[in-house]
Amino acid sequence: MGMLSIGVFSSLVGSMDLDFAVRLARAAINKGHTVNLWLSGNATALSKDKQKEFKDYSFPDKTLRELIGKGLTVVSCEACNQSRGIQKEDMTEGINRASMDLYLAKAAQSDRVLHIGVE
Amino acid sequence: MGMLSIGVFSSLVGSMDLDFAVRLARAAINKGHTVNLWLSGNATALSKDKQKEFKDYSFPDKTLRELIGKGLTVVSCEACNQSRGIQKEDMTEGINRASMDLYLAKAAQSDRVLHIGVE
Amino acid sequence: MGLKNKIMFVVQRPPYKSEDPKLALTHALSSGVTSIHIDEEVVPTVAFIGDGILNCVRDQKSMEAYGIISNERHIKNMLATDTKTLVCKEDIERLGIKEERLIDASDMGADMTIKVVPFNEILKEMEENDHLMFF
Amino acid sequence: MGLKNKIMFVVQRPPYKSEDPKLALTHALSSGVTSIHIDEEVVPTVAFIGDGILNCVRDQKSMEAYGIISNERHIKNMLATDTKTLVCKEDIERLGIKEERLIDASDMGADMTIKVVPFNEILKEMEENDHLMFF
Amino acid sequence: MKLGLFFSDLHGIEDTYDRINSQELGVFLVSNGIYHAVLKENGKPSKILNKKGASFYVLKEDLHTRGFSEGEVDSRVKVISYDDLVDLVMDRYEKLAWI
Amino acid sequence: MKLGLFFSDLHGIEDTYDRINSQELGVFLVSNGIYHAVLKENGKPSKILNKKGASFYVLKEDLHTRGFSEGEVDSRVKVISYDDLVDLVMDRYEKLAWI
């Protein structure tokens, strides 16, 4: 079993890149791999708590919470959050906040890195 | 003097479309025009309170607040906010929340409409 | 001065990559309720051009695959509410989309269909509308 | 298995339209502090290709115009910290950017300069690095 | 119609642009659209500037942000400020499209 | 190297792609990249598929989302699930790039 790091920088709604990343993480975890997810740029929107589910909008939030329960590590860029007004207490439980050096360190420890830029 | 409606759908950070929209609004207001600003999609991030100013990130928030004091009308898409977990009480004072029919109605009353899609 | 209430929504981006096409559709659909704010309703025209024509391909199974309402569903709603909906002929030909692959809403009892027209006709619509919104 | 700590940052988008190029630079710059997490530092290589080479044009006055730190400033910091920085020769030629228009950091005492190389050399770097990140 | 077109990208919009005609056409080069005013891709000025009868404008702030100056702007393009932009938009071009 | 390339757009990435060579190359058509597997722009299959020696994969969910089905996929492209994708990524391609 290996370790996969996924970095995502795309928007929460509309791009579907976050849906993709979370689905890929789920498939990898179900096969026994270790997965790290790094959220930066616009993707930090996924770390915000209290997202409302609309059938018209992407809602990877639900699957993400399940995966955190199964061991997925999620880290969200601290400055990206702060610049967007997302405070530490606004974040979904289980999502950590750190700076990019942690992403790079995790990447260096990983067998595979999939870095997804802006949509 | 005329009425200008600006709709923006781009990201708060990185695209600079919101910086553009706010600067255009400022120039128009200073010349005596009436300006309406509609924030939808990713641009609803601009309606979030408590954005932290970093010199490395766009920060149209400050100018926006000044312009609201000078009569700029700002309306932010309700569902777009809710899907991103931004509650009514999380929003910058003076920014209203409504659905898109209000944008269209304002557009119909305007001499000019500049609609800026995603970056 | 009267209202400038003829608004044209031009969709130029493909679906499911940016929020733009879906927002174009939801905005156009909300035209019917603008009368709560102004004397007359906004009259929408929707046109798909460039790679945006890919929004008009039928059988979008986004709900089954990702749990998200498809753009097809919104286009069907638009047709069912008699919104004038155009798609650029040159672009569907360029991308090889046959007319029978385009969305229709006859199962919802809609009379309106997506009308395949040359770009020139879309340009003429741009002239006739009061405001333009490119998505 | 040892660390896969050679990471290549490939910037393919122009500046000031998406956050990607700036995030590439801030990520690359943070390589120096990764040692607080792992045994060895991450060793970054940065390459600009396609329209991304426009990030390398000097005299960016984003601070004066919009109050935002320029990508130029970050590139200068990168050079001052001895990060290997490549720009694609074919692309600067295609867009007509002369070498004297490229950012340098000699005023900060940097020895490192942006190295203009053919795409093939960038491809070779891709082979030599452990992980790739395209921005 | 009197149409003001906003360009904010270097690539990917030419196809729509080529097909748009208007009795009066203003092209506003903003954001990454400014590159059309200053670059000579493959040795030639941007094809965007070849449209007959159109007026071309580039936003000064966006030009400077990207490292370019007035002296590098193609002679067919007028450098404008936000104030100029407001006047052009409110007085001259009745319909606007950000493509 | 053993390189897995992810394509998520229909246009705008060909230039980089054309220049990339790799001893072993896998091309993953995801998101709007799926159009390369099914459309015949100007009557011809995507040039993307002409690269010699490369393996091509298209993600089933993304194909279906956009209204296309297995029967419309070019014969050079293999339709895969998320499970298949994980195996290919973890076992076969050592470096990955989302371009």
Image: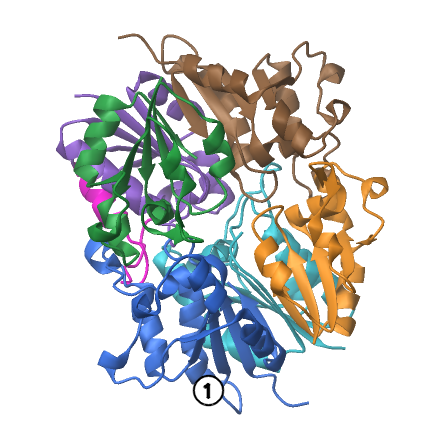
Chain colours: A purple, B cyan, C blue, D brown, E orange, F green
Q: Going by the image, does D107 lie left or right of F73?
A: right
Chain ID at mark 1: C
Q: Where residue B73 sits in the image (x, y, percent)? A: 60, 70
Q: Where residue D126 sits in the image (x, y, percent)? A: 45, 18
Magenta-colored stretch includes residue F41: no
Q: Which stretch did the figure color magenta?
A: A48-69
At 36% across and 8% down in the image, what residue appears?
A: D39
Based on the displayed image, in which of its 4 quarters is residue F66 positioned?
bottom left
Based on the displayed image, in which of its 4 quarters is residue F69 positioned?
bottom left
Q: Where residue E5 sits in the image (x, y, percent)? A: 67, 63
Foreground residue among F38 and E80: F38
Estimate how packed mark 1 is, as few (under 14), some (14 to 19) or many (20 or more) residues with alpha carbons within 10 Å.
few
Q: Going by the image, does E27 lie left or right of B5?
A: right
Please determine whether, in this image, residue E62 is positioned above or below residue C104.
above
Residue carrying label 1? C36
Q: Where residue C106 sits in the image (x, y, percent)? A: 26, 81
Please determine whether, in this image, residue E27 is positioned above or below residue C128.
above
Mark 1 residue type:
Ile
Foreground residue among F74 and A92: F74
Whether residue D29 is visible to the viewer of this picture, yes or no, is no
Q: Residue furthest front?
A: F43
At 21% across and 39% down in the image, what residue appears?
A: F82
> In which quadrant will I find the N terminus of chain D?
top left
Magenta-colored stretch includes residue A60: yes
Q: Going by the image, does D109 lie left or right of A79?
A: right
Please determine whether, in this image, residue F11 is positioned above or below residue D90.
below
Based on the displayed image, in which of its 4 quarters is residue A98 positioned?
top left
